[in-house]
Image (spheres, rainbow, N blue to C red):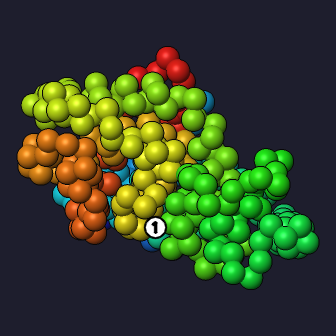
Amino acid sequence: MHYIVQKPKKRVRFNEVAVEYRGRYWALGPYYVNLKNVEDEEQSSMKINQMQYYYDSAYSVKAIITSNEMALDERNFRSAYYEKVGFRSVEEKKTLEMLLKDKPLDMGKLKQFCLRFSVPPTHRKLLWKLLLGVLPMYIDCHSFVIKQRQQEYEDLLRALEIMRVIDGNTPKPQLFLAMWLLQSGRLHFESNLKMESSFIPITQSLMQFFDDDIDIYWVSKCFYDNVLKFENDIPKLIESTWSLLEKEDIALYEHLYSTYIINHFPIRQWFSCCFAGVLNESALGKIWDKICGGSYKLLMFVVVVLFTNQRHKLMKAYNVERAMECLSQIPEETAEIIANKSIEMLQQHTQHVVYDKLKATST
């Protein structure tokens, strides 16, 4: 920011700027500070500083918060330019830190942050626990809630040991599954902890993000409970996925359709576990940021980008076994590209980014 003194103690000119907000440019300035009636240097300096403060405020877009949209406080308008040229997370960390200072915390703002921006890895654990309901929005209650979570974890563990459902050799993913079954009232004497369940891969992936067993269990439980809420919408989501693939790459779609491969992909399983075990930790973290924000619709974009990214291999496959080999062991760098492009596609197909809970009638 510059200012030019036209005449000593007469006026100060602040150069014109334009703020880009929601695709429109808002002209701000030039601004002039009239100093004709200012007697001394001290008053002159105070008036210039006051105007400079208001002028600097123009660099931070503060929009009205509505039920469907939110503008993050003090979001520097130049961040949009930085993101376009590849420099992401320029202001995101500072913005998130401001949001985390609210008392109480605002669930809507935190969800919207996850949907619109990249979540700094240093804040990801706390943000997931807040959005998934592991921790409440009232920061002053966190210590108490953490103790209660620990006590409940120990009670569940002790109960399973007494019932001899688990022992010292039970793997942690199966242990946490047994705890979830007991807590949700689904545990029976004939329950098989080795059964195919999306809970297991989700827990295995979360073990890469969290070190504490108590955190792993509670985040796994709450994450899986959220997945179950949109489970009935998965058939519609699968249908929308194939429609989008046909639109994006009709040649690939027709090849998969004509060879009957398209009907044998474990896409329902991918959606149920949110690609846990399919993509690596770094890419999965970015995708799950959006899932925690409420945008389950992202999952169909991940499938489409995954297929188009591996197009050259899939076009040579004529059975599902060969096709699955093409999609297995995705390199870390490729997984990052898939995650980033999926998020970009989601934002391009969403005029107003809102935390969208899928409905059976949605596309």
Where residue 243 sits in the image (x, y, percent)? 28, 24
Q: Is residue 116 above or below residue 10?
A: above
Q: Residue at x 27, y 40 (%)?
A: 304
Left or right of residue 43: residue 267: left
Q: Nearer the viewer, residue 186 or 132?
A: 186
Q: Residue extending furthest bottom?
A: 168
Quarter-of-image position of residue 297: top left
Where residue 120 sits in the image (x, y, percent)? 46, 67
Q: Nearer the viewer, residue 290 or 65?
A: 290
Would residue 142 be visible to someone looking at this image? Answer: yes
Where residue 363 sits in the image (x, y, percent)? 41, 23
Q: Is residue 202 above or below residue 64?
A: below
Where residue 305 sits in the image (x, y, percent)? 25, 45
Left or right of residue 226: residue 152: right
Q: Residue extending furthest top?
A: 361
Q: Residue at x 53, y 37 (%)?
A: 355
Q: Nearer the viewer, residue 265 or 89?
A: 265
Q: Secondary structure at mark 1?
A: loop
Q: Is residue 306 above or below residue 102?
A: above
Label 1: how many Cα within 10 Å (few below 14, some 14–19, many 20+):
some
Residue type at mark 1? Pro
Left or right of residue 138: residue 27: left
Q: Which residue is mark 1?
A: 120
Q: Residue at x 54, y 67 (%)?
A: 204
